[in-house]
Image (cartoon, coloured by chain):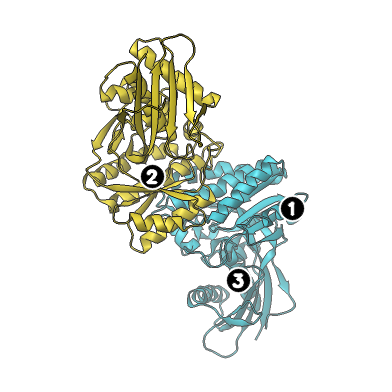
Chain colours: A yellow, B cyan
Amino acid sequence: MSKATVTAPANIAFIKYWGARDLDRAIPMNTSISMTLEHCVTQCTVETLSHGGEDEVWLAEPDGGFGTADPDFARRIREQLNRIRQWAGRKEPVRVATRNSFPTAGGLASSASGFAALTLAAVAAFGKKPSQRDLSLLARRSGSGSACRSIFGGFVEWAANTGNGSEEESYARQIADADHWDLRNVIAVVEIGPKTVSSIEGHRLATTSPYYGKRLELIPGRAEKVRKAIRERDLNALGPAIEEEAIDLHLITMSSHPPIFYWSPGSLAVLRAVRELRQEGLAAWATMDAGANVHVICDADSEDEVAERLEDLPAVGFVIRDGIGPGPEQDEEHLF
Amino acid sequence: MSKATVTAPANIAFIKYWGARDLDRAIPMNTSISMTLEHCVTQCTVETLSHGGEDEVWLAEPDGGFGTADPDFARRIREQLNRIRQWAGRKEPVRVATRNSFPTAGGLASSASGFAALTLAAVAAFGKKPSQRDLSLLARRSGSGSACRSIFGGFVEWAANTGNGSEEESYARQIADADHWDLRNVIAVVEIGPKTVSSIEGHRLATTSPYYGKRLELIPGRAEKVRKAIRERDLNALGPAIEEEAIDLHLITMSSHPPIFYWSPGSLAVLRAVRELRQEGLAAWATMDAGANVHVICDADSEDEVAERLEDLPAVGFVIRDGIGPGPEQDEEHLF
């Protein structure tokens, strides 16, 4: 028996993964770029079991105890464990426990941190020490593609095609570390609980939007703006690009067939408030994943005021203050 | 001296006019199709003045009295009066008074009914009796292009290009009269007061959306669906087409440079409620002009329930129940 525990972060995409060439293996249609978070994390312990039988999957519950995962989520975890066993040449079942530091689903990228933590903990429990590239590939194959970005800290790019276009070439890499730029992410939580349409379903429908082809044409230019703004630590260049990109993602979902509305009334209230903050001279820019909650990107000097203003909005349940994080780490203490 | 008073209706577009080949003369980039309303109307009295001098422009105020129009609106009215004088070969100044039956601006098409009523009343005051086609052309040239549809009752189409593509060919015509299909329009008012970005500015920015070209490609097919649904009185065919079209208009505004957000949080709350009504089996479909308010199209049997449900939404200030109308009429009684 061997046991490993890893804490892996969520990430917020500046350029979004939306639509796949191969949805099961999460081979994306477009390049994505993200910032790895510091406080929104998933902790996962994996223990190999000496006896045979099934994998055990436990999820932390709000009271601090652990309960069984819902069947669909447990199935996705077992499938990922099977991929890792196959890759590692191992056969033992494992016991898994996992805990998020933040509310699950609702566009807070719990699946990215969750599958990154699971992948890293399982690999460590099996005693393997692969390259970062291989870890990113393994995390991506979970089907929660953006997990491949959560393997790294700082700013991360997951290229759609870095080489020959094969599945082996689709992985993420760090483009700047967490010390490069102290960006903050104030998350205005307007809806808790699972989304009505999963991201996976959204990816599947992406290509049914008549605007999807044009979106793919726009991405390279927008990604280059984001890369340059990160390189130059230029928030006033980064901001418009990421806000435009976030709106763009939702334009695609709302023009899919059938349309998907991830925005709630509260999302629009926050977007409006962020525009007002800018009119007052504050550099704060919104981005949103496939969900209702709004991530407001600002610098360290503005964080307090941004957070206070967003907290005051009736539509906002609470805010989560997060910043840029150094990436996953292996923990000494285990969840069980 | 001669005086005429006309009541002209607002209209709600099923296929939207958005973007112009020539914005000043309102030559549209695409075909539009609308339903003329019954109760949302503008009444306008025009009196020719025997003495020289300036036109006088009076607007009804909430207390029932009349006040002076704001300078920008008064200028647009005078410019339209100049066009009509030139067309009629007349030179006298006029006194104009105008009153809306509904809250102005905010996507309730007050300019369409307003410029239709002004045009018809002025033409009548000058003693002219032009063809419907010429009246539609004259109303369109006001710059509030959709006024050209308010010349007719029932269902109206304003073709982008009906012949040689010249300015003289851009006018509206009735495609079915008001007796053809008793549709209702329950307007959920979530915001009162002028829009932060005018429709004219929105038209001007339309072509800056990277998706605008694709939108123009989609319009003919969608317009044909709408025509067929009207012909066959098929609400379940009409509904999806008009709701898709309304979302589409706002996708274009939100992807313009700079982006325009006409939606308010309340707009999304109503859109969501309309989807819920449909899940309960009610045939109700939303459309929106360039504003925050939501027009819910349904049949006569569903109107009461739709109106009650929308009234109950916290985001909705009040609802206006309207139906399909027979078009403008000349009034015996004058506003002054």
**Which residue appears at 29% of the width and 56% of the height?**
A301
Residue type beneath disc 3: Thr
Q: Which residue is mark 2?
A: A245
**Between A112 and A212, which is closer to the camera in this rendering?**
A112
Is label 1 in a helix, a strand or a loop? helix
**Which residue appears at 52% of the width and 85% of the height?**
B54
- Label 1 environment density (alpha carbons within 10 Å; few <14, some 14–19, many ≥20): many
Q: Which residue is mark 3?
A: B119
Q: Residue A67's x, y, as percent?
A: 52, 28
Work out how far the residue at label 3 is from the one at label 1, CA to CA, in angstroms: 33 Å
Q: Which residue is mark 1?
A: B303
Is label 3 in a helix, a strand or a loop? helix
Work out how far the residue at label 2 is from the one at label 3, CA to CA, in angstroms: 44 Å
The answer to which image quadrant residue A109 occupies is top left
- On whether disc 2 and disc 1 are found on a single subunit, the reply is no
Residue type beneath disc 1: Glu
Is A103 positioned to the left or the right of B64 in the image?
Answer: left
Q: Residue B23's x, y, as percent?
A: 46, 61
Asked if labels 1 and 2 touch by Cβ distance under 8 angstroms, the answer is no
**Between A160 and B206, which is closer to the camera in this rendering?**
A160
Look at the image and tell me whether residue A46 can be seen: yes
Q: Which chain letter goes with mark 1?
A: B
Is label 2 in a helix, a strand or a loop? helix
- Label 2 environment density (alpha carbons within 10 Å; few <14, some 14–19, many ≥20): many
Asked if labels 1 and 3 touch by Cβ distance under 8 angstroms, the answer is no
Is A221 positioned to the left or the right of B334 in the image?
Answer: left
